[in-house]
Amino acid sequence: MNELKGKVILITGSSTGIGRAAALRFASEGSRVIITYLRDDKAAWETAEQCQREGASGSMVLRLDVTDDVSIRKAVADTVGEMGGIDVLVNNAGVVERKRVEEQSFEDIERQLRVNLEGAIKMTQACLPHLRSMVINVASVTALRGYPTLGVYAASKGGLISFTRTLAEEIEPMKAYNVFPRTTATQMTNFHGDPPEKVAETILLLARGDYLAPNGGDVKVGEPPAVRGRATVQAEVAR
């Protein structure tokens, strides 16, 4: 039995990179996929078309700026109006400025915190009245230890991790999880690192319930299913 067939999956930042890979992976399960983009509408429509070829039972393309309250509310309302609700929200949209803290402008700092943390929180809040199953937040291993030039980015992801912990307590029996990619080959990393499909597979298996991570817990990309992800992440911190 395919538990994701017909489920509504809303993925932020899904015209390219990890988000696109996740959209295609959910499409192959027969899900209804909501693709969101900020600037590249051509890539978003190409992703939607590929989702249909992969077997999606429906798809939508929406412009979404997670730093704009009106845009957030409109995207959620349009999704619910068309699909009737949201089963899984994947907060994937993110930005990074690779600079030492002293080199970051106030605008650099604000943008990373607004997109990576505030945007994910607001998206979640807007979706909650219509959510049926789960929130998956794309965190980062940079939040677990020091990475020079990634201090602000790491802080935004650290805040997201903490948010997930509390969210899980508030929305139970619905679920909330963090996914921890390593360096992934996207535009953000100049296409260096793991293939985004590897992250997408972890997101899909988590949505399908193949991991035994506790509610509010963590799964590192590449962990085999049926392991308790939080213990692994805690061991990583200890090292």
Image (spheres, grey):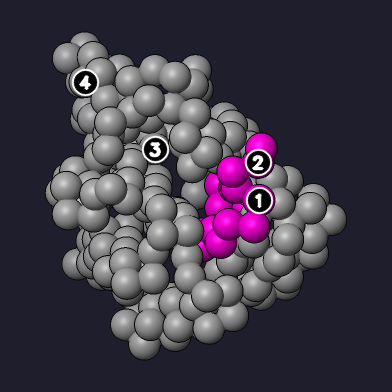
Instruction: Mark 3 or mark 4: name the one nearer the start of the chain.
Output: 3
Q: Name the residue under label 2.
A: 2
Q: Measuring 69% from the left and 45% from the top, which residue is drawn there?
A: 29
Q: Do the residues labelled 1 and 2 touch (CB within 8 Å)?
A: yes
Amino acid residing under circle 4:
Gln
Please tell me whether mark 2 sits on a helix, a strand or a loop: loop
- Answer with mark 2 or mark 4, whichever residue precedes in sequence: 2
Q: How crowded is mark 3: few (under 14 residues within 10 Å), some or many (20 or more)?
A: many
Comes first in the chain, label 2 or label 3? 2
Image coords of residue 75 (percent x, y) = 47, 79
Which residue has dot 3 on it? 179
How far is disc 3 from disc 4 in space, using C-alphas?
Answer: 14 Å
Quarter containing the N terminus = top right
Name the disc covering residue 234, or none: 4
Q: For the residue marked with disc 1, what is the amino acid? A: Lys
- Magenta residues (range): 1-23
In terms of depth relative to the viewer, which is nearer, 103 or 236? 236
What secondary structure is marked by label 1?
loop
Question: Badge 2: how crowded within 10 Å, few (<14), some, or many (20+)?
Answer: few
Query: What residue sits 26% from the left and 63% below the top?
Result: 121
Q: Which of marks 3 and 1 is in front?
A: 1
Left or right of 5, for residue 10: left
Depth order, front residue of 36/157: 36
Residue 5's tag is 1
